[in-house]
Amino acid sequence: MKKSTSGLCPVENRAASIDKGAVEVAMVEEDVLFESNQDMSDEWILYYYPRFPGRAEFVRLVFVEAGVPWKECGLDGPSVWKLICGGEMPGYPHFAPPVLQKGDLQISQTSVICKYLGEQFGLVPDSVEDRIHAEQISLSCHDYIAEGRLSFHGIHPQGPYLSQKEATQPYIDRFVSERLPRWMKYFERVLSNNQEGKGFLYGDKLSYADLALLHIVRATEAQFPEAFKAADYMQNLKDFKLRMEARKNIADYLRSDKWLGFSGDSMM
């Protein structure tokens, strides 16, 4: 198979990644969610497409670090789309998954979910200024992933990558050569702004923004291994990734079948 100069992780590995195993957190059936009288007010339920991490991984990492259990919705992809994008989910309208539910509360927009959970679980910086900056960096992490994903769908933003694989390769190459370094150099400066990059983003305390940063660095390495290895301008980020992956809850999660593995395209 011909290698791309961008160091793109071959999409042919996708099946091996997404077939790693079903998520072992408890699954819930649709009829149980909406027709049962069972009290589920204390359960966190995450609605997202199955069998690949996607944007929901930002949310999962907050639960993992906090040691708080959650449940995946257990629905297949078309059912998730119909429920949320098709507007069949009772309650407040949502544009797209992930959606997080606890009792009557429903939240969408990944960065909003992560900020809310960070506040609930004590994963926020102490000062007002740092909290503002944490939200700023969280949003920047999501912008980076969105831009990277779009490069895999340069012809049709909502079309499958495989249907435009050759045509969109120039967009991927440009992202790797131009945009990836700019983003990573920025995140390197942000991390280095606190304790010379040897700790967390803000003070001595891990926040939801640290978990967002961990995810995008991992996604970058998985998707573009050659470019990541060659990037000599982000050593603090690389060390940060190793430190975060060694934290007990995160390490246990990444060794388990709960971690689905990256899909092999679209930084998902």
Image (cartoon, rainbow, N blue to C red):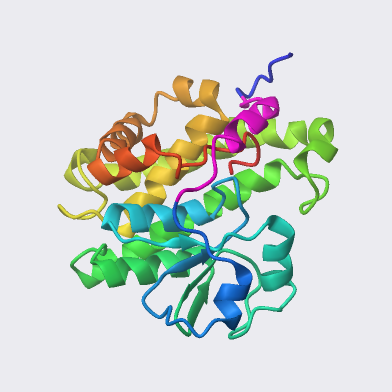
Tell me what residue is drawn at x 24 percent, y 41 percent: 247
Q: Whole-percent x and y of residue 17?
A: 58, 33
In the picture as drawn, the residue positioned furthest to the front comes out as: 37
Q: Whole-percent x and y of residue 252?
A: 31, 40
Front residue of this view, candidates 265 and 23: 23
Front residue of this view, candidates 205 and 193: 205
Residue 131: quadrant of the picture: bottom left
Q: Write the start and end of the magenta stretch as one range.
A: 8-24
* In this rendering, position of residue 142 left or right of residue 8: left
Task: Classify 150 as above or below 173.
Answer: below
Task: Classify 252 as above or below 204.
Answer: above
Tell me what residue is drawn at x 48 percent, y 51 percent: 57
Please say whether residue 13 is one of the residues in the magenta stretch. yes
Q: Quadrant of the C terminus?
A: top right
Tell me what residue is drawn at x 18 percent, y 67 percent: 126
Please say whether residue 134 is one of the residues in the magenta stretch. no
Front residue of this view, candidates 247 and 257: 257
Front residue of this view, candidates 264 and 183: 264
Task: Classify 119 as above or below 229.
Answer: below
Q: Quadrant of the N terminus?
A: top right
Q: Whole-percent x and y of residue 183?
A: 49, 43
Q: Whole-percent x and y of residue 203?
A: 17, 54
Residue 176: quadrant of the picture: top right
Tell me what residue is drawn at x 48 percent, y 31 percent: 221
Q: How many marks?
A: 0
* In this rendering, position of residue 267 left or right of residue 1: left
* In this rendering, position of residue 95 left or right of residue 107: right
